[in-house]
C-alpha cells in the first residue's frame, strides 16, 4: 500500500532538489538559430556547423587537417543538460567513434564531463544513421557545450550531428568578495525538520571558505565549508549531557575544488541517514548521536557569518560564486536577488558571477591529458606553467623527440604509463 502523504512529501522533496527534473528532456539543438552552432572550422558549405542537427540533411565536418576540431553549441542561456546524442553525417562514411564533452558558462572556460569511472571519453557512432544517446549520470548546467572528436571512422572523416537533452535552468547567483555574507531568517523563527535538503552550486579560486552555517540552542548545527579545497560537512542533530553518544559528524568530499569550475553540492537527510552528493558522486552516511530532528534557531548564514556571536570558531568567509542555494524548497539565492525582507546582507553581495582570469586547466583523473599541436622541425621548445596537485607522482608534460605526428599521445614512453592521478593536477 502506498502511504499517500509520504508519496506527496517525497515528490515535494524531489521537486526541491532541482535535480532529475521530471520531464526535463527536450531536444535543445534542433530549435536553435543557426548562429548558435559554431565550429573550429568546416569542410565545405554543406558541412557547416548549422547542419549538425539530428536527422538533418548532412552533418558537420571540419576542414581536413584541422589540428583541434570542435563543434560548439550556444544554448543562448543556461540549461540543465541530462543527455547527449550523436549521429554521423547523412548518407556518408563520416562519423565520430569517440569524443569528449566540454561545457561552460563562457567560451573561454571549459569543464570536461566525466562519466562514471572518471573517464571523459564517450563512445560515439558505428555508422552514419543510428543515433547513439548517453544519459549522463549527473546533470550539469551550462550555456555553452563543446564536442571534441577524438576518433572517427578510419574509412571516412569526422562527421557529426548532435542532440542535447534537457531544459532551461533558472540561475540565481550570489557573488561573495570574501568580506560579505547573507543571512536568511526562518519563517517561524525556528526550523525543525526530520528531513532536509541543502543544495547549491559553487565556483571559487580559494581553498578555504564558509559556505553555509546554521545552529540551534539544543546543540544542533549544520556547516558546509571548504578546507584545503575539500568540501567538509559538519552536522549534529544535538547532544545533551545525559546522552552517552556525541552527535558530531564530519564528512569530507572532493579535492581541488578551487578550480574555478562549478561544483554541485547536495545534502539529503532523513533522520540520521544522510547523503552528501558532490558533482554526481553520492556518499551515504549515518549521523552520530541519538536524535532525529534538526532544530535550527532564527537564521541560516551563506558565504560567512553576519554580525554573529556564534559557536563556530573563526572561519574565512567564502570568496566566489554560489548559485541556487536551496534549503527545504526555499531558494535563498532567489530571495536575496529579490531583496526579500528575510534576507540580511553584509557587505556588497553581487548578483552575477565575477570571474577572475586566467583560468586553470584541471586534470581530474587518470588518463586525462591535453594534446597540443607542436612546431615540427624546430630545434627549441619553451613552455611555462604553474601547477598544483595533491599527488606525489604524475606526468606534467611530454614532448616527442620525433617530428612524426602520431595518433597516440604516449607512444614513446618507457616504463609505467603516465597516470595523472585521481586527485587532479591543475595547470
Ligand atoms: C575511456 O572510455 C573510452 C570509451 O568510452 C575507452 O576507449 C577508454 O579505454 C577508456 N579509458 C579508460 C582509462 O578507462
Ligand atoms: C547502425 O548501428 C546500429 C547500432 O548502433 C544498428 O542497430 C543499426 O542497425 C545500424 N544501421 C545500419 C544501417 O547499419
Ligand atoms: C540516499 O541515497 C540512496 C540511493 O543512492 C537512497 O536510497 C536513500 O533514500 C538516500 N537517502 C536520503 C536520506 O535521501
Image (cartoon, helix red, strand yellow):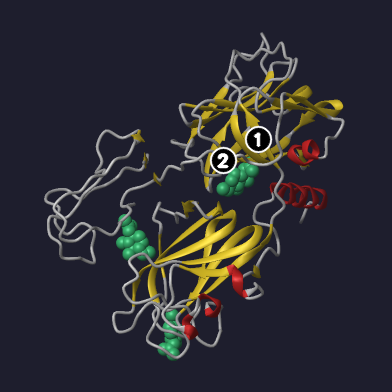
Q: What is the CA distance from the residue labelled 1 to the residue labelled 2?
A: 10 Å
Residue projecting furthest to the bottom = 91
**Where, by quadrant of the figure, is residue 334 drawn?**
top right
Tell me: 191 left or right of 198.
right
Q: Which one is in front, 69 or 316?
A: 69
The quarter of the picture where the C terminus appears is top left
| Residue 175 - label | 1
Residue highlighted by disc 2? 355
**Where, by quadrant of the figure, is residue 37 drawn?**
bottom right
Picture coordinates of residue 346, whole percent (x, y): 74, 23
Q: Residues within 10 Å of mark 2 (few under 14, many from 20)?
A: some
- Counting residues from the start of the chain, the first of labels 1 and 2 encountered is 1
Picture coordinates of residue 24, whole percent (x, y): 68, 63
Residue 81 vertical placement versus 51 (above, below): above
Residue 324 vertical placement versus 252 (above, below): below
Tell me: 48 left or right of 411.
right
Picture coordinates of residue 58, whole percent (x, y): 50, 86
**Where, by quadrant of the figure, is residue 402 drawn?**
bottom left
- At 54% from the left edge and 39% from the top edge, which residue is drawn? 284
Amino acid at each position: 500500500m502506498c502511504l499517500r502523504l509520504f508519496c506527496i512529501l517525497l515528490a515535494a522533496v524531489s521537486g526541491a532538489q532541482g535535480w532529475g527534473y521530471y520531464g526535463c528532456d527536450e531536444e535543445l539543438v534542433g530549435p536553435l538559430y543557426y548562429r548558435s552552432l559554431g565550429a573550429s572550422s568546416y569542410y565545405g558549405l554543406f558541412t557547416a556547423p548549422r547542419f549538425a542537427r539530428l536527422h538533418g540533411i548532412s552533418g558537420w565536418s571540419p576542414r581536413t587537417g584541422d589540428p583541434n576540431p570542435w563543434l560548439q553549441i550556444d544554448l543562448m542561456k543556461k540549461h540543465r543538460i541530462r543527455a547527449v546524442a550523436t549521429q554521423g553525417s547523412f548518407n556518408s562514411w563520416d562519423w565520430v567513434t569517440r569524443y569528449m564533452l566540454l561545457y561552460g558558462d563562457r567560451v573561454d572556460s571549459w569543464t570536461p564531463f566525466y562519466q562514471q569511472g572518471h573517464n571523459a571519453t564517450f563512445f560515439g557512432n558505428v555508422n552514419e544513421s543510428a543515433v547513439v544517446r548517453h544519459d549522463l549520470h549527473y546533470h550539469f548546467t551550462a550555456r555553452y557545450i563543446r564536442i571534441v572528436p577524438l576518433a572517427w571512422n578510419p574509412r571516412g572523416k569526422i562527421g557529426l550531428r548532435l542532440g542535447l537533452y534537457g531544459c532551461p535552468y533558472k540561475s540565481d547567483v550570489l557573488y561573495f568578495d570574501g568580506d560579505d555574507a547573507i543571512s536568511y531568517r526562518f519563517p517561524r523563527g525556528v526550523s525543525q525538520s526530520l528531513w532536509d535538503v541543502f543544495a547549491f552550486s559553487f565556483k571559487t579560486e580559494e581553498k578555504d571558505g564558509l559556505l553555509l552555517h546554521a545552529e540551534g540552542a539544543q546543540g544542533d548545527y549544520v556547516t558546509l565549508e571548504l578546507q584545503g579545497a575539500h568540501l567538509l560537512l559538519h552536522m549534529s542533530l544535538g547532544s545533551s549531557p545525559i546522552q552517552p553518544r556525541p552527535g558530531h559528524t564530519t564528512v569530507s568530499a572532493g579535492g581541488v575544488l578551487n578550480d574555478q569550475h562549478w561544483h554541485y553540492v547536495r545534502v539529503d537527510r532523513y533522520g540520521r541517514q544522510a547523503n552528501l552528493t558532490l558533482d554526481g558522486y553520492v556518499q551515504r552516511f549515518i549521523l552520530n548521536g541519538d536524535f532525529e530532528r534538526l532544530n535550527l534557531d532564527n537564521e541560516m548564514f551563506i558565504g560567512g557569518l553576519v554580525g554573529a556571536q556564534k559557536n563556530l570558531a573563526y572561519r574565512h568567509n567564502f570568496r566566489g560564486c554560489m548559485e541556487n542555494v536551496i534549503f527545504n524548497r526555499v531558494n535563498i539565492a532567489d530571495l536575496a536577488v529579490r531583496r526579500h525582507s528575510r534576507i540580511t546582507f553584509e557587505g556588497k553581495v553581487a548578483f552575477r558571477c565575477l570571474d577572475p582570469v586566467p583560468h586553470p586547466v584541471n586534470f581530474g583523473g587518470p588518463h586525462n591529458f591535453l594534446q597540443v599541436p607542436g612546431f615540427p622541425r624546430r630545434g627549441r621548445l619553451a613552455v611555462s606553467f604553474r601547477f598544483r596537485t595533491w599527488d606525489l607522482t604524475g606526468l606534467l608534460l611530454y614532448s616527442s623527440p620525433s617530428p612524426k605526428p602520431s595518433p597516440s599521445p604516449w607512444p614513446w614512453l618507457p616504463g609505467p604509463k603516465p597516470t595523472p592521478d585521481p586527485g587532479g593536477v591543475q595547470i
